[in-house]
Image (cartoon, helix red, strand yellow):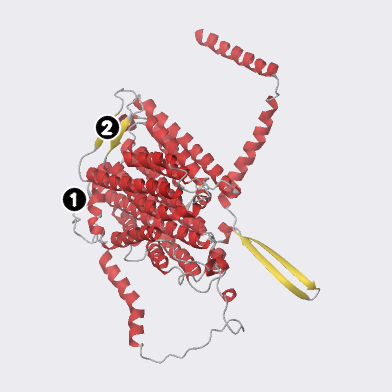
Amino acid sequence: MLAFYLIGAFSSLILNKKDRICSYISFSSAAAGALSGVLFSSWIIFGDSFYFTLSQDSYLKFGFFVDKLSAFFILVISISVFAVSIFSTGYVKEYFGKKNIGHLGFLYNIFILSMIFVVCANNAIMFLIMWELMSVISFFLVVYEHEKPETRKAGFIYIVMTHIGTGFIILSFMIFASGSGNFNFETFKAAGSTMTPLLKDLAFIFAFIGFGTKAGIVPFHIWLPYAHPAAPSNVSALMSGVMIKTAIFMLIRINFDFLGASESLWGYIVLIAGTISAIIGILYAVVESDMKRMLAFSSIENIGIILIGLGASMIFLSSGKPILSAIAAIAALYHLLNHSVFKGLLFMGAGSILYSTHTKNIEKLGGIIKKMPVSAILILIGVLSISAMPPFSGFVSEWLTFQSLLLSFNLNNNFAIITLSICAAFLALTGALAAYCFLKFFGMVFLALPRSEHAQHAKEVNIPMLAAMGIFALLSILLGILPMYVLPALDRIAASFIGTSAFSQSIPVGTFWMVSIPSSHGISISTPVLLAILLILMLIPAIILLINRNTRQPFYETWGCGQPVSTSRNEYSAKAFSKPVQVWFKSLYRPARETEATYSSPYLKESFKFESRIEQVFEQYLYNPVVDFVMVKSRKARLIQTGSIHAYLGYIFGILIILFMFVIAGGD
């Protein structure tokens, strides 16, 4: 596996002058490495752990440790990399003769390697090295099109935020190291059980902020809507699909393995943060007109859904309900897998639209279903899956998460029942808004009439790009209709860090979608029955059409506000479609409106321009004041930078005197 990625990386540098050959070898090697990763991770999930040590030093063991949890993340990474690598062979043709393909291929392969090393590192120092490598390489991928000012801005915000997060991660690891006496992860587990409650809380908070920044949890999410749209679409698919999930990996490792999820307060923090991220993420996605920014905000939403499952799992485990904890953890892992698939599909779909039309603006598209019919069908599958429509994959994992929240009625804790029930209500609202958001996306991009020259001249993308989207579309269907074959494997993985199998207690493995979960309160939710009802409701319109197919229907000319023929100017725009949501949540959006009119005479208006902008609340009221404060203090600190060597020697002399005073005081 590692050899294929190294071959892909260094062959890219050697062949960087030959764009076509370089792209094929680089991305084909990555695809071969991904297949090896699928085989390797499957072997670990259904077998034993893998351990390889480079250094036997007891204080700092450099090596790799792959247990079932690590193997699951390698599997998720490998599945995404395989499809995205195939997509890349067709997508990067857009850069031939314009950008250095060799540099892209090298960064792409090393980026994948760094993600694999992150989930395999067996000590804190090696982890931080690989984490930093992943961050720096992904920064260079984000700014690949660095000639654009907005890309450079996105890269700067990303690198600053990711290093702030790394600082908090280092603080958390230092607390664990102080308790264990070394930096090896295997000793962190013992240290977690012996540390004082204050140190445990600090280790959790620092880790949550550090890894939450990389995952895009609100309010640490501001880099994500900038970085994902700026990066090439194949890179965006990997960053959103798998890179931000490496932070989820470490949150699971720290909360369950190192700290034992012993405090219910930590679970409530994760649960509430996930709920806020889910609802805020999808609310901002609804009003976006940039396809890739919309998908980036949607990633924040789905990370929130994953955290809802993990938070519920932590609450159940700390409450002495390991079976319920395992069910919630399985729901979180399933949604993590599903999100990597359908979000990868949608980012590749957005890349295909951009490749064909040269615009990301939804307002400038429309009617391209006739120009790109195959892409439209594949993207529709991704839209239905991310909207949690049965029988696609997103429905299964979101419904399982919803079920796990309702299992809170098994607890003898009214606060937990109320909190989890409220979060379940917000999860339902999030699902409804997601369907609304992606209805807007598909309708405005593919249906009605073209609204620009970009859309009128669109054409279907090449075979590798369609094949890659087809792989993810097929997986979105299979993961939705065959979850009974996936859940036992996820149960093995969840049991490795929870300590209990969900299928071992009253829940048969063959049960379809983990239905009829036993409850002391008599609650039983049958997913197949629900699915059957939904499918019947979906079939009713088709049955009505079949009954009336021979009925003569009158046809009338479309009425377009007095115009003889309807035009694209008579159609809904994306902003108009999302206007009701803007009105409902105007306290969050705080919309700013600008109007400009041109008059040919005092009585005749020649033209009228209206523009509406959504305010980024967290950026405006949280980060900008902090930046302004730092800049003011920095300007004051510059006063000591006189440029005089005599002043600097005086500073050094003063510091030495202070140090000598401390030494003397310590000696006395």
Nearer to us in this view, 445 or 383:
445
- Which of disc 2 and disc 1 is earlier in sequence? 2
Q: CA distance from mark 1 to mark 2?
A: 32 Å
The part of the image, by quadrant, that contains residue 596 is bottom right
Secondary structure under the numbered disc 1 in the rendered image = helix
Any mark on residue 460, and which?
Answer: none
Residue 445 coordinates in the image, percent (x, y) = 49, 67
The residue wearing badge 2 is: 52
Q: Residue at x 30, y 61 (%)?
A: 480
Residue 581 coordinates in the image, percent (x, y) = 53, 65
Nearer to us in this view, 668 or 589:
589
Check the picture and name the quadrant holding the N terminus: top left
| Disc 2 residue crowd, few under 14, some 14–19, many 20+, Cα 10 Å | few
Q: Is residue 328 left or right of residue 433?
A: left
Q: Residue furthest top?
A: 668
Residue 473 coordinates in the image, percent (x, y) = 35, 61
Task: Mark yes or no: residue 414 visible.
Answer: no
Secondary structure under the numbered disc 2 in the rendered image = strand
Nearer to us in this view, 277 or 78:
78
Mark 1 or 2: in front is 2
Residue 555 coordinates in the image, percent (x, y) = 48, 89
Residue type for callout 1: Ser
Q: Are marks 1 and 2 in contact (CB under 8 Å)?
A: no
Q: Is residue 626 left or right of residue 335?
A: right
Vertical comparison of 373 with 295: above or below: below
| Disc 1 residue crowd, few under 14, some 14–19, many 20+, Cα 10 Å | few
Task: Mark yes or no: residue 655 visible.
Answer: yes
Residue type for callout 2: Phe
The residue wearing badge 1 is: 504
Q: Residue at x 38, y 61 (%)?
A: 463
